[in-house]
Image (cartoon, rainbow, N blue to C red):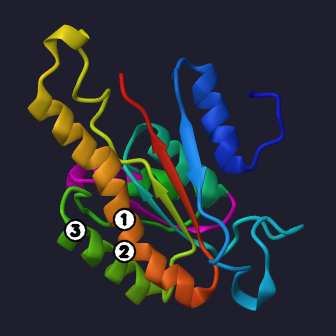
Amino acid sequence: HPDEKWSSTGGVLARYASEGVRTVVVTCTNGELGDGPGGLKPGAEGHGHAERVVIVTGGSSGIGYAIAKAFAQERARVVITARRPGPLNEAAEALTALTGGVIVGIASDTTEQTQVDALVDAVSARYSRVDVLVNCAASPSGLVRNRIEELDAATLLHDLNTKVVGYARCCKAVVPLMKRQRWGRILNIGGFT
């Protein structure tokens, strides 16, 4: 509910929900990933997301863009990724101008494990860690948009490869880093029309 006290990321999702998005599903990892560097717990009083390294897939537009903006406004180190370099670089520049932070754009396609691995390697080389992964990659408005009787299985499978299997690829790439750090969070945001 938009009136509840949510984290900044949740607040972004609540705003989108009030603007007509019908379903937002968020799942978070917890448990064995630990408390974080220096024992600092996420969202601890006065610390928020400052200096955390955050990867946002699908960060060049829509909900991913808004989530990247929210993290950047809290002084996180934000890396956005999407398939198309042009819109991705434009988004990174716009977010940098809007927030005063440095938002890095790295093109990748979540349907390819080698590209996901290269993305995570590049982020790790730049910042030595990944604290938060926000899986938000999708085709604009989804690929499957017609009546169920007209469903094209190949199109549905492509959508699932991006949204479901792609999210799993990203998790596979970041979880070993998060375990070594003894802290990390993963948000999976998805929906189908």
Does 151 sit left or right of 180 as displayed?
left
Please give the residue where the numbered disc 3 appears in the rendered image. 113
* Residue 98 visible at all: no
Neighbours of disc 1 within 10 Å: few (<14), some (14-19), many (20+): many
Magenta span of residues: 74-91
Q: Position of residue 170 (x, y in %)?
A: 36, 65
| Residue 170 numbered mark, or none | 1
Tell me the number on the disc at residue 173: 2
Q: Secondary structure at mark 2?
A: helix
Of the residues shown, which amino acid type is indicated by label 2? Ala
Residue 67 in the magenta stretch? The answer is no
The percent coordinates of residue 125 (x first, y second) are: 39, 89
**Label pair 2/1, CB-CB below 8 angstroms:** yes
Asked if marks 2 and 3 touch (Cβ < 8 Å), the reply is yes
> Within the image, what quadrant is residue 1 found in?
top right
Q: Amino acid at mark 1?
A: Cys
Tag 3: Cα neighbours inside 10 Å, few (<14), some, or many (≥20)? some
Between disc 1 and disc 3, whose residue precedes? 3
Q: CA distance from mark 1 to mark 3?
A: 8 Å
**Residue at 24% over, 38% down:** 159
- What number of labels is visible? 3
The residue shown at (13%, 29%) is: 153
